[in-house]
């Protein structure tokens, strides 16, 4: 990292959505640029910087929440017209704030993604894509999964409009007119798309994408098939990517990639000739970064990275030095500009203190009045509950527009809370009575430090046990108020959507036949599995593939009206599906004809998939148990030279081993539970109850050997 950037705040607007800040084009290469930012109050603010102060160009009246802000204009002219989407309406403003367009897209859902190119307008609701030219309907497409973003290749370079949709099912859908040309499979659910180098690169066909699990990639969209230029994994487990831009901030003549993440991380990547990415700068803000742009805002001749955060802070990471240094015996003299700025800030602070005192007195007087009415203060919450593939856990990220006082987590299903390094809140647990009907399995309170607006937690669920996790969020507001958010823990909660599965595994099959509609069987699959679109697919039948993020076992679900087929190499997965689907059908008084085919080879196959994890955890547990005794020996002898290399290695790595063991509570018990469930489920399909033999199974696990375990499964 060889670039030095200094953080400077410009102003604060309301709560912002993804991609709602743009820099208007500058007149010269190094001239100051105006900033257009839109917020959830429906206000568009356009401002420029003059003598270190944010000077407004225009500001619109409040209205419906603005979900996107894009720049447009006639081809070949500066793209300085401002377009915003709110609800199902698109409005256009000149750079001076005069409204010239109000267009109702007639969508049944709100617009959540938009792209403007000349006279062409591309808008997307949750599942619907529409293309308008001169406000006249051109093309329409119904997506198979939720659309997160849209971008269109530049028509002047590729010869025609080529829209690309970023869809939740890990696919970039490339359209031709109203038809799907092809899909590009990406490693995570894509959350944002941008044209490479702002114009699609040399041929205008290169797309940068970022995913909700923090991956970054570049794809070349050709006529026949995509070419993946490069992909970058999220090895350091940073947040999901919300915004991308390209700008030459390093000043080497090559545009760098600017990335903003939902954990507040701002990054600058440089790309070398061999398509190798190198991180050149990193800065962490306290809130998620909803927009990022490269340009010149604060002062002429000083480039910067402009960011907007969730609570509406518009800030810059500028190349302009923010500190002056004096040598020995020298004095630093503030410029008149700085002196006037400090005086203005002091005056503003005094006025705010007076306003606060007046407001507090007024509130005290009104609260003692017989006609006092207390109003509940409203506050926005930005939450994300996602399955992490790397450690088979769920990440719950909560962000509030004001400081969080405390958070109460309540769950009616067994879940483990995992340690998160970024989390500085103090957690305390309450006793739960899970034996009672609708009893609690978890009650945990997080007390946050002052000015904490974002909290990240991790939980791990047990497949087959399903219910609801509730988060009660209390901010530092008066009078006290609380918001409740609910998150469903699904029966097969650790399964993740994938594009394909291995066909050579021993599979168990579950088949359902009955008088149910396509919509009904789809709703059952949505209830059982994560990452399935809630909207019923338009086709007559559908096939989804899943992979268990913990074990690596697979599931294929194919269903249509009156019939459903489920295949998995794990008997326990089939058993959970059988129990839950039977229960759901019974609730709706639908008779199901259930048949199944169990492959005996799948049991040993699943045990072999569990084996490396179990062996590693047993070894880790043994090493941790030895640490205290080895440390005592080391203290007694004065050194560890007399120990064999294996024990010396345990002592050397003791901190890492203890940290790893601490981060994986109940990991060994979880694996024991999976093997026990597999044992019971195997014989349940044969009509045998083997719960009396579980104690013998646990004895074998305590003296673990894979061959002995497989023999026990076969002989029982």
Image (spheres, grey):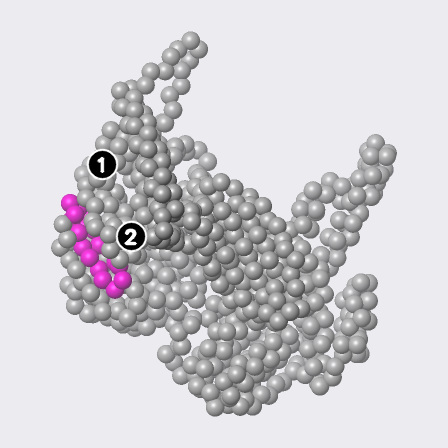
* Mark 2 surroundings within 10 Å by alpha-carbon count, few (fewer than 14), some (14 through 19), many (20 or more): some
Vertical side of 410 occupied by 680: above or below: below
If the image is split into quadrants, where does the C terminus sit? bottom right
Residue drawn at the location 43% of the way across and 66% of the way down:
169
**Residue 640 in the figure: left or right of residue 552:** right
Q: Residue furthest front?
A: 370
Mark 1 or 2, closer to the camera: 2
Alpha-carbon distance for marks 1 and 2? 20 Å
Q: Nearer the viewer, residue 135 or 597?
A: 135
Q: Does residue 78 belong to the magenta stretch?
A: yes
Mark number, residue 462: none
Q: Nearer the viewer, residue 466 or 647?
A: 466
SS at circle 1: strand
Q: Is residue 261 above or below residue 189?
A: above
In this picture, residue 112 sits left or right of residue 381: left
Q: Which residues are magenta?
A: 77-97
Q: Which residue position holds label 2?
A: 41
Residue found 68% across the figure and 83% down from its top: 685
Q: Earlier in the sequence, mark 1 or mark 2?
A: 2
Q: Is residue 361 above or below residue 566?
A: above
Q: Is residue 452 magenta?
A: no
Return the mark for residue 55: 1
Confirm whether residue 428 shows in the render.
yes
Query: At 14% from the left edge and 50% from the top edge, which residue is drawn?
Result: 98
Residue 414 placement: quadrant: bottom right
Q: In x, y percent, where is residue 213?
A: 48, 56
Residue 620 picture location, percent across and down: 73, 52
């Amino acid at each position: 990292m060889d670039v030095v950037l200094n953080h400077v705040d410009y102003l604060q607007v309301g709560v912002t959505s993804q991609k709602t800040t743009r820099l208007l084009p500058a007149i010269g290469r190094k001239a100051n640029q105006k900033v257009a930012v839109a917020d959830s109050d429906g206000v568009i603010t356009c401002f420029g910087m003059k003598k270190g102060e944010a000077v407004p160009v225009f500001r619109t009246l409040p209205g419906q929440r603005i979900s996107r802000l894009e720049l447009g204009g006639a081809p070949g002219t500066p793209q300085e017209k401002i377009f915003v989407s709110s609800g199902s309406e698109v409005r256009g403003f000149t750079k001076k704030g005069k409204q010239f367009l109000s267009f109702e897209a007639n969508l049944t859902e709100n617009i959540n993604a938009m792209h403007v190119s000349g006279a062409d307008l591309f808008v997307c609701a949750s599942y619907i894509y529409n293309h308008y030219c001169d406000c006249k309907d051109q093309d329409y497409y119904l997506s198979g999964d939720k659309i997160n973003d849209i971008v269109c290749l530049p028509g002047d370079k590729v010869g025609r409009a080529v829209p690309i949709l970023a869809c939740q099912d890990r696919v970039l859908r490339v359209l031709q007119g109203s038809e799907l040309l092809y899909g590009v499979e990406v490693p995570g659910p894509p959350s944002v798309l941008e044209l490479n180098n702002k114009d699609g690169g040399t041929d205008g066909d290169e797309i940068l994408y970022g995913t909700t699990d923090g991956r970054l990639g570049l794809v070349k969209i050709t006529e026949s098939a995509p070419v993946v230029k490069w992909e970058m994994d999220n090895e350091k487990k940073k947040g999901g990517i919300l915004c991308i831009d390209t700008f030459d901030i390093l000043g080497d003549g090559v545009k760098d990639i600017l990335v903003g993440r939902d954990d507040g991380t701002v990054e600058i990547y440089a790309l070398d000739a061999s398509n190798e990415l190198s991180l050149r700068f990193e800065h962490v803000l306290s809130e998620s970064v909803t927009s990022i742009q490269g340009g010149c805002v604060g002062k002429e001749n000083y480039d910067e990275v402009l960011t907007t955060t969730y609570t509406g802070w518009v800030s810059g990471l500028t190349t302009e030095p923010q500190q002056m240094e004096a040598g020995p015996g020298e004095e630093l003299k503030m410029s008149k500009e700085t002196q006037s700025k400090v005086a203005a800030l002091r005056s503003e602070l005094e006025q705010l203190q007076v306003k606060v005192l007046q407001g507090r007195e007024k509130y005290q007087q009104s609260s003692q009045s017989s006609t006092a009415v207390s109003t509940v203060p409203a506050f926005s919450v930005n939450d994300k509950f996602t399955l992490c593939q790397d450690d088979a856990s769920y990440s719950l990220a909560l962000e509030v527009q004001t400081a969080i006082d405390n958070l109460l987590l309540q769950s009616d299903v067994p879940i483990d809370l995992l340690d998160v390094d970024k989390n500085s809140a103090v957690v305390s647990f309450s006793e739960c009575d899970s034996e009672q009907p609708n009893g609690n399995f978890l009650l945990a309170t997080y007390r946050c430090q002052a000015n904490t607006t974002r909290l990240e937690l991790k939980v791990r669920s047990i497949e087959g046990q399903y219910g609801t996790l509730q988060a009660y969020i209390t901010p530092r507001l008066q009078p006290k108020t609380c918001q409740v958010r609910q998150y469903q823990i699904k029966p097969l909660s650790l399964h993740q959507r994938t594009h394909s599965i291995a066909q050579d595994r021993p599979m168990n099959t579950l088949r359902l036949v009955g008088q149910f509609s396509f919509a009904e069987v789809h709703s059952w699959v949505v209830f059982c599995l994560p990452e399935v679109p809630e909207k019923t697919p338009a086709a007559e039948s559908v096939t989804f593939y899943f992979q268990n993020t913990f074990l690596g076992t697979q599931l294929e679900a194919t269903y249509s009206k009156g019939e459903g087929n489920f295949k998995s190499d794990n008997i326990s997965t089939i058993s959970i599906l059988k129990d839950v689907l039977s229960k759901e059908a019974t609730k709706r008084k639908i008779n199901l004809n259930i048949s199944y085919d169990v492959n005996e080879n799948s049991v040993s196959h699943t045990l072999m998939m569990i084996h490396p994890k179990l062996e590693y955890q047993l070894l880790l547990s043994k090493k941790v148990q030895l640490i205290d005794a080895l440390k005592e020996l080391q203290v007694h002898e004065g050194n560890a030279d007399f120990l064999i290399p294996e024990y010396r290695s345990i002592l050397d790595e003791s901190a890492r081993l203890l940290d790893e063991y601490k981060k994986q509570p109940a990991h060994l018990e979880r694996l024991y539970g999976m093997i026990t469930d597999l044992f019971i489920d195997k014989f349940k399909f044969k009509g045998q109850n083997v719960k009396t033999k579980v104690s013998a199974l646990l004895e074998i696990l305590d003296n673990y050997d894979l061959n002995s375990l497989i023999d026990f499964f076969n002989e029982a």
